[in-house]
Image (spheres, grey):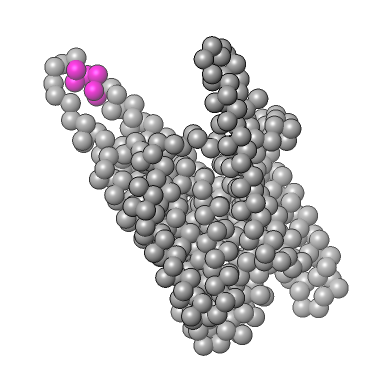
Amino acid sequence: MMLRTFGWSFGVTVVGLAFAAWQWGWEAFGIVLILSILEISLSFDNAVVNAGILKKMNAFWQRIFLTVGILIAVFGMRLVFPVVIVAISAKVGPVEAVQLALDDPDRYQDLVTDAHPAIAAFGGMFLLMIFLDFILEDREIKWLTWLERPLAKLGRIDMLSVCVALVALLTTAMTFATHAHVSTGHADKAATVLLSGVAGLITYLVVGGLSAHFEEKIEEEEEQEEEAEEKARAEGRPISPVALAGKAAFFMFLYLEVLDASFSFDGVIGAFAITNHIFWMALGLGIGAMYVRSLTVYLVRQGTLDDYVYLEHGAHYAIGALAAILLITIQHQISEIITGLIGVVLIAASFLASVRRNRALAAEGAPGEPEEKKGEVRSGA
């Protein structure tokens, strides 16, 4: 079962890493490997969300998402999007950006390095908003209760996540402006950091709005299906579940594409904290995307989405750490090893916490154990 589900991912990993080592050397091999791990760790919650929606769709739409969707995710978001980011940030055409990467890597590196404050501010704000919206929401299951409970209470304040993110952006821009006054030729970069950060915030709000819109469409379609089925039963008419399921599945597909693009964006932006080499980035993130696809299929087939309940928490803490790192790297360099492995450490910690929780549930689920007590353990209180 594992080999059948993850076979393509294993094959792509071997070929991709071998190509990186042959074409660019062992440094590229290491960076591509770290990027693959980073993408998997950041996108685990993406696989969980995808699987939760995908299991409601019929076989046809599942194949559409897992074929067309993976093409968009790998070739669109992981290959084309990094080039677009570099082109916009460095103010060059996409073709010129690729040509520079191939023909004049030193010049390309200078352009990307010069554009790094804008990229880091944009991506840092986008990732920070994802983390804040997660950590400020009151959830039934909590991992670090000493931290998540008080933050959930603060989250009742409307638009708090936006306010916190803007304060973080202003602090970063003002600090950068102060540093720029003692550095010649960088005074205008503070305004660029501020503008790029606001653009990242707007992008997040737009993506979130579209996702909410599609989610409402899904709920409306489900309600219409139920009403149509009840009416058909009352009138003694046959029910046509294929057509009804098809309409709902179409909106689910659109919703999944928006979500998948947003989570793909996380990985692409986060990769800039590790390397500016667009081909290493595309290769590493592409390998990671294959595992996310395989993991989505595995979760759907096994029906084990709720087995490790803290993994989503670990993924979002990794996103928050990466957001902070991106904002810090506007002025200070941080080791790529720290950046690449912090997500893995947090995911591993949340996985082990989930395992311990499952063992406690199993122990308290012995014969004669009251249901009320088991419910308290499940709540994570």
- Residue 19 quadrant: bottom left
Q: Is residue 329 left or right of residue 229?
A: right
Asked if one can make out residue 361 in the rendered structure from this viewpoint, the answer is yes
Q: Is residue 380 left or right of residue 12?
A: right
| Residue under the point 26% across and 35% down | 245
* Relative to 357, residue 132 above or below: below
The image position of residue 129, as x and y in percent, is: 62, 47
Q: Quadrant of the C terminus?
A: top right
Classified by dominant secondary structure, the portion drawn in magenta counts as helix
Which residue ends up furthest to the left in the rendered image? 237
* Relative to 229, residue 64 above or below: below
Q: Is residue 358 left or right of residue 333?
A: left
The image position of residue 47, as x and y in percent, is: 46, 46
The image position of residue 77, as x and y in percent, is: 46, 62
* Relative to 156, residue 14 above or below: below
Instruction: Tell whether position 74 is magenta.
Output: no
Which residue ends up furthest to the bottom in the rendered image? 103
- Residue 271 quadrant: bottom right
The image position of residue 292, as x and y in percent, is: 45, 52
| Residue under the point 45% across and 65% down | 13
Q: Nearer the viewer, residue 287 or 241?
A: 287
* Magenta segment boundaries in residue numbering: 228-233
| Residue under the point 71% across and 66% down | 335
| Residue under the point 13% across and 17% down | 236
Q: Nearer the viewer, residue 33 or 273?
A: 33
